[in-house]
Amino acid sequence: MKKTIRRIVAAAAFLGVLVQPVTAFCMPKLAYTYTLPVSAAANTGTLIGTEIGHCQERKFKIGGGLLTIQSINYGNQYQATGTNTTGPALPYSKFTTVNPVIVGPMVSTAQSLGYQPSAAFDLEIGGFTNYAGYTPSSKLYLPMNYEMFVCPVAGYQPAMMVLLPNGMFRLLNDSEFDRSYSGSLFVDGSQKFVLHTYYPKGIYMLVYIRQ
């Protein structure tokens, strides 16, 4: 009984006000939106890779349960970022690792909610120019889309959580973390998922939720 109380208290310390609609997942209601004491803006990770404009799309290795990620043109990335195919600014997606100071609370929160935490990465979206370099977008006008290959875990459903710069940490819904391609296994045993995000800056963590 004492262990149960301690777990409830630990989870409550990270939970915020419920603002998101119920998703198809079976989980505590307050799991959809809550805040953390560490801001995503505090991330000082190591660069994994960057895609710029209409350059050839590349897969970047993430590790853990999330093998690779790459941007895909399901929508118009130029319209999404307010850039143009002829310049001067081209859209970019920058992937970096996550500071352990931030990963720790994210892992603890996921575990307190009954999820199995896995790989995390920082994603920044914006416009790139030769004279100004990388300028993060303040907002996205259309979703940016990313293809992910995820290792399945028996008895669990993959899901994606995001920590925003304002400290809000939420579970992505079915329209944001697309499972429509997950029915087929690839040669390496992975499943394909697609991230559709309106957030120009965020730290994403793959989690597994018991089915």
Image (cartoon, rainbow, N blue to C red):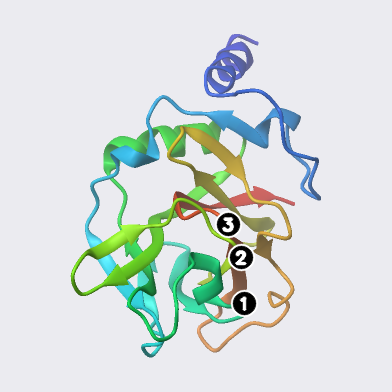
Q: Amino acid at mark 1?
A: Gly
Query: In this view of the protein, which residue sits in the foreground, 66 or 138?
Result: 138
- Mark yes or no: residue 146 visible: no
Residue position for label 3: 198
> Is 23 positioned to the left or the right of 188 in the image?
right
**Residue drawn at x 55%, y 68% as measured from the top left:** 80
Structural distance between the alpha carbons of marks 1 and 3:
12 Å
Q: Amino acid at mark 2?
A: Leu
Structural distance between the alpha carbons of marks 1 and 2:
7 Å
SS of the residue at dot 1?
loop
Name the outermost residue toward the top. Answer: 2
Residue position for label 2: 142
Q: Earlier in the sequence, mark 3 or mark 2?
A: 2
Residue position for label 1: 75
> Is 2 positioned to the left or the right of 103 in the image?
right
Q: Position of residue 28 (x, y in %)?
A: 73, 32
* Closer to viewer: mark 3 or mark 2: 2
Query: Few, some or many C-alpha atoms within 10 Å of disc 2 (few <14, some 14-19, many ≥20)?
Result: some
